[in-house]
């Protein structure tokens, strides 16, 4: 729903949301040296919830 409470349909072929109970800090570190920009987000920082993962991903995208 948008800010006015109206439903929106977003077409997509694939949507992936991965959540966990423990942070995956060590699993993300190998990517630090192979990417021009590296922003760990979501469960790579703190295992929390989907809202946290999406928000940190959004914040990282804004910095690019």
Image: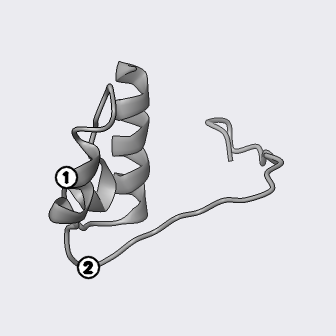
- Disc 2/disc 1 C-alpha distance (Å): 18 Å
Can you say whether 1 is above or below 34 in the image?
below
Q: What is the quadrant of residue 60 in the picture?
A: top left
Mark 2 / mark 1, whichever is N-terminal:
2
Residue 29, which numbered label? 1
Q: Residues within 10 Å of mark 2 (few under 14, many from 20)?
A: few
Query: Which secondary structure, mark 1?
Result: helix
Residue 8, which numbered label? none
- Where residue 33 appears, x then y in whole percent? 22, 38
Query: Which secondary structure, mark 2?
Result: loop
Name the residue at 16% across, 63% down.
26
Name the residue at 44% across, 49% down.
54
Q: What is the quadrant of residue 44 in the picture?
A: bottom left
- Where residue 41 appears, x then y in whole percent? 30, 48
- According to the picture, the residue beneath numbered tag 2 turns out to be 21
Image check: 19 left or right of 31? Answer: right
Image check: 60 left or right of 5? Answer: left
Q: Nearer the viewer, residue 48 or 40?
A: 40
Farthest residue, direction left: 26
Colouring rule applied to residues: one colour
Name the residue at 20% across, 68% down.
23
Image check: 33 left or right of 37? Answer: left
- Where residue 64 appears, x then y in whole percent? 40, 20
Q: What is the quadrant of residue 59 in the picture?
A: top left
Name the residue at 28% across, 37% down.
39
Can you say whether 57 is above or below 63 in the image?
below
- Where residue 21 appears, x then y in whole percent? 26, 79
Residue mark closest to the camera, 2 vs 1:
1
Image check: 44 left or right of 57? Answer: left
């Amino acid at each position: 729903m948008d800010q006015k409470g109206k439903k929106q349909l977003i077409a997509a072929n694939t949507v992936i949301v991965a959540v966990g109970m423990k942070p995956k800090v060590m699993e993300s570190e190998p990517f630090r040296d192979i990417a021009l920009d590296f922003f760990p987000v979501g469960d790579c920082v703190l295992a929390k919830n989907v809202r946290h993962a999406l928000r940190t991903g959004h914040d990282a995208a804004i910095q690019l």
